[in-house]
Structure formats: structure tokens, C-alpha cells
Image: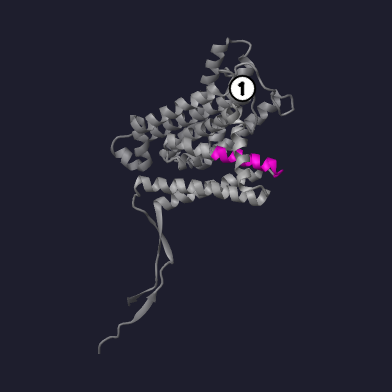
Amino acid sequence: MAKKEAVKTVREPLFHVVKRDDLPWWKAWLIRVATIVIAIFLVGILSVVVTGQSFGGTYQIMFSGVFGRLFEGHTTMLWKYLQEIVILLSLALALTPAFKMKFWNCGAEGQALMGGLASIICMIELGDKLSYPVLLAVITITSIFAGALWGVIPAIFKAAFNTNETLFTLMMNYIATQIIAYYVYIKGGGSNVINPVSAGNFPSVGGNDYFVNIMIVSVITVVMYIYLKYSKQGYEISVVGESQNTARYIGINVKKVIIRTMIISGALCGITGMLLVAGKDHSININSVGGQGFTAILMSWLGQFNPFIMVVMTAIVVFLRLGVAKVADTALLNSSFSEIMVGIVILMLVGCEFFIHYSIKFKHKKEAAA
């Protein structure tokens, strides 16, 4: 007797995520540009709804909050805008070698603070003892060393004991914050404020206090691009990031690459701390970096580890942050409004990158013979 063939319905997930074949570069960039335009448009709409301003008036306020009276020949606000860009960009550049190696360095805040601490100590303790050029040289060397030291500690533990670098670097942030708080308390006489220090500040060029900062980060941007794309060490970073087993197979010392790369990453964060202290604030506190170390993580990712793309991304994010802050100030809103708007834009950009690299495939019920 022939067996009857049983038929049943097999239920599969409604959809699943599939890695997309590489899109042509122009399509990927078209999607990114469209996302940025839509995000800025959405920020304008939300600002209009919350503040009651006209649509055009909202963007006018945003523009004035970033560039001031630029068309009247006043460039002060423009230089401040560029200064904000280079600080965030400097942190993103510092994180990029480690992230490309898939070492999740979340400690840019602490590494920058330690670089800033080294700077302010030199400015206070050695300001009246060394000549200005020598003092600047000492500030630079000690800041780089302090940032590198704070970066290499988790790298050594990762290389030797395979510890979790994300948690390790995050905890190092808290330690650095408490060290800064203690130093400020001691030097501030219990007031938790260190008055601006005049010794060791970067020189003003053409009446502009931020020119040196901008030039330093511009040079770092070009050097980092060349380092990652054309140097042997940049190649080793890429190989270790793709597969540590492959790197070992072709003779790359993975532990050495991890430690060396984190020394570079920490050193660049230390330079950022120096830029904040000697080139901008002339003082230090626990909020000197202001959470930008975490925003820099997104800038590095959204810039696809390309320093020049990171310039564009940081310029957009800083523009929105400053512009929406001006809108909020005009409408007497809480300063958190600006952070919410920037968060929405970043979320849209992250979503854009997801859909560039992955697609969602929907599945249907189908019959299968049992």
C-alpha cells in the first residue's frame, strides 16, 4: 500500500538580514547625501514644531549660530566653528587606527584628559622656569607620553591576557576623571576651578587664538591618511583587523601591532588634550572633553576610517550641534534640545550605513513534503 505523502506548512521567520553585495560607490554616496539632506530637513521641521519659528527663520538662526555675521566680514564665529570641528576630528582620528584593527578603544575621554593634565601641570609648575619655546616642547612631549601611557595599559593586558578592551578602556576613563577632579581640587584651593593659566598657551596667529590648533589637526589628518593607506604599519593594522589568525600566518606579530597601535591612538588623544588645555581653555576640569570622545567613535565609523570623510562628518555634526543650540537658546529651550536633534541625525546616518551594507529579505510560507 502506497504511503500517503504528508504535507505540512513550514513557518520561517518573516524576514532576515542579508549582507548586500557591494554597491557601486556612487550609489552608496548618493544614499548618504540624501540621508544627510533629509536629516537636516527633519531637524528643521522638528525645530519649527517645538519653537514656533518659521521654517526659513529656523535655518537663519542656525546659520547665525554657527557663522555669526560672516557676510559682514566678521569671522570670529567661523574660527570657533573650525575649532570645534578640529577637536572632535582629532579624537576621531586618534580612535581610527585602533578601530580599524578591531580594538574597541572607548577610552578617548580618559586619554585626552591625561594629556590635558600633563599640559596643565607643565604650564603651572614650569611656566616661570623655562623659556617659551622649551616650555611648549615639554608640554607637547609630556602630553603625548601621558596619552600614550593611558592607551597602552589596556593594550598590554589585551595582548598578554586577552582582556575585554571595551570595558578596560571605559574604566580607565573613570580613573582619569577622578585624577583630574583630585588635581583640580588641590590646585583650585577647594574651589574645583583652576583659573586660566597664561604660561605655555599656544601663540595667536593673525589675532586668531585657534589657528595653531587647526593647523596641527590638519597635518594629523593628512599624515593619518597616508599612514593607514600607504605604510607597512597601516597594512598590518588592516590585516589584524580582518583576521588575527591570517596575520599570524603571514608572520605579523599581532601582540606587537596591538600595543604599537594603541600607543599611537593614546598619543593622538594626548595631543587632543594638549589642544584643549594649551590651545583653547588654558585650564582643565572633568568636563574639558565634554563627552566628545564617545561622539568621535561614531565619527570614525561613519567616516569609514577615512580621515577626509571624517572631516565632512564632523563638520556636519558640529554645525547641527551649534546651530540647533542657537535655536534652543533663542526659544528659551533646555540645552538638551540640541543633543536630541544631533542624536536623531546620527541615528539616521547609522541607519543609512546599515542599509548600504545589508538588505532585509522577507520570507513567505511554503509547503514541504514530510
Residue marked by disc 1: 120
Q: Is residue 141 left or right of residue 129?
A: left
Dot 1 crowding, Cα within 10 Å, few <14, some 14–19, many 20+: many
Q: Is residue 115 left or right of residue 22?
A: right
Image quarter where the N terminus lies is: bottom left
Disc 1 residue type? Ile
Residue 359's spot in the image, x, y percent? 40, 56
> As drawn, which residue projects farthest toward the front?
72
- The stretch drawn in magenta includes residue 326: yes
When asked about the image quadrant of residue 119, the answer is: top right
Q: Name the secondary structure under disc 1.
A: helix
Q: Is residue 120 visible?
A: yes
Q: Residue at x 37, y 45 (%)?
A: 26
Pick whichever, 259 or 19, lies toward us.
19
When asked about the image quadrant of residue 138, the answer is: top right
Residue 265's spot in the image, x, y percent? 47, 31
